Amino acid sequence: MSLRKLLVVVVVAVVVALYVALDLGRFFSLDALKAQQAALDAYRAANPWLTAGIYFLIYVAVTALSLPGAAIMTLAGGAVFGLLWGIVLVSFASSLGATLAFLASRFLLRDWVQGRFGDRLRAINAGVEKEG
């Protein structure tokens, strides 16, 4: 494994370990959202761009690392930012997070997939080239 791949694995492992060790999942529940809704609304009213930026980055991280809580984050987006801005933030953040998850898995698992399924992949590519 190359140094770059090892670094990516270590970073992901540390972030996931911190998520579990600090019990950050407790913030991704409907009860936690309901308890903090007034404070979140007040903070958003005072700092709308900063709140949207923080929410966006957290949503991207949750999605990219496939951490539990994305469904609650989606509901929180609608509750805090309203339907229109909630949809916009969630759509872009979830797309970016999913893209990052895909790129990380492709970067980390590419050699393994090619070693395990290389014959099948070459056969599929050969078939596509004949049709095209």
Image (cartoon, grey):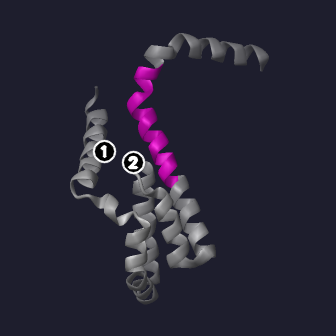
Q: Indicate the position of residue 81 as horizontal and vertical percent values.
A: 53, 77
Magenta residue check for 58:
no
Image: 102 above or below 119: below
Residue displayed at 41% across by 89% down: 46
Q: Which mark is residue 129?
A: none
- Rate crowding at label 1 as few (under 14), some (14 to 19) or many (20 or more) other CA atoms within 10 Å: some
Mark 2–mark 1 contact, CB under 8 Å? yes
Mark 2 lies on a secondary structure that is loop
Is 128 left, or right, of 22 in this rendering? Answer: right
- Rate crowding at label 2 as few (under 14), some (14 to 19) or many (20 or more) other CA atoms within 10 Å: some
Q: Magenta part mainly helix, strand or loop?
A: helix
Image: 6 above or below 89: above
Q: Nearer the viewer, residue 38 or 56?
A: 38
For mark 1, what is the residue? Answer: 12
Mark 1 lies on a secondary structure that is helix
Looking at the rendered image, the quarter that the N terminus falls into is: top left
Q: Indicate the position of residue 54 as horizontal and vertical percent values.
A: 40, 70
**Amino acid at dot 2:** Leu
* Mark 2 / mark 1, whichever is N-terminal: 1
Residue located farthest toward the right when viewing the structure as drawn: 131
Residue located farthest toward the front when viewing the structure as drawn: 31
Q: Nearer the viewer, residue 71 or 126?
A: 71
For mark 2, what is the residue? Answer: 65
Is 124 left, or right, of 5 in this rendering? Answer: right
Looking at the rendered image, the quarter that the C terminus falls into is: top right
Q: CA distance from mark 2 to mark 1?
A: 7 Å
Q: Indicate the position of residue 2 as horizontal and vertical percent values.
A: 28, 28
Q: Which residues are magenta?
A: 96-113
**Amino acid at dot 1:** Val
Residue 13 falls in which quadrant of the image?
A: top left
Residue located farthest toward the left when viewing the structure as drawn: 21
Residue displayed at 40% across by 70% down: 31
